[in-house]
Image (cartoon, rainbow, N blue to C red):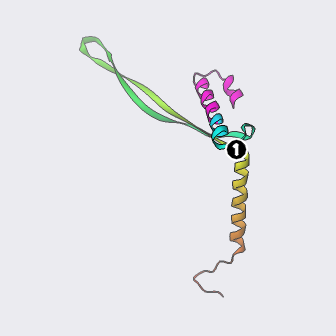
Amino acid sequence: AQAILMFTPKAASPIVSKLLKSAVANAVHNFSLKEEELYVKEIFVNEGLRLTRLLPRAKGKTDKIKKRTSHITIVVSSKTVEEKKIVKKQSAIQQIEGKEIVENGSKE
């Protein structure tokens, strides 16, 4: 993802690249995950605050300028963590399948 962002000619790519580096550094430092095993699980942008400014116009009138902001969220996950979750889910499903289900409290 970092290589793609480096060569993307968009105005937001340096900002997202910096955020991605920060997310990877946080995952490595805070959760002791390996940098090689990390991948971008999800990324989304939410609407932030709207700042309003007034622009003076002719005859004493004004126009509003809306300066919009946004919140960027990147979720990074490790491949080994995801594999462990899948194994736990599969073992839980096997335990449920092994039990006999009785409806209405009576066996026939």
Please provide the residue range marked out in magenta: 1-23
User: Which amino acid does the dot numbered 1 rest on?
Assistant: Ser
Q: Is residue 2 above or below residue 75?
A: above
Q: Where's residue 76, x and y in %?
A: 64, 40
Residue 60 point in image, percent of width and height: 24, 14
Please tell me which residue lies in front, 63 or 29.
29
Residue ID at (29%, 18%):
62
Identity of the residue furthest to the bottom in this view = 108
Nearest the viewer among 89 and 101 is 89
Asked where in the image residue 1 lies, by quadrant, the reply is top right
Which residue is rendered at x = 61% and y = 23% of the image? 14
- Indicate yes or no whether the magenta region holds residue 60: no
Residue at (26, 16) in percent of width and height: 61
Q: Is residue 20 magenta?
A: yes
- Element class at badge 1: strand
Q: Position of residue 28 (x, y in %)?
A: 67, 38
Residue 71, given in percent of the width and then of the height, sits at 50, 34
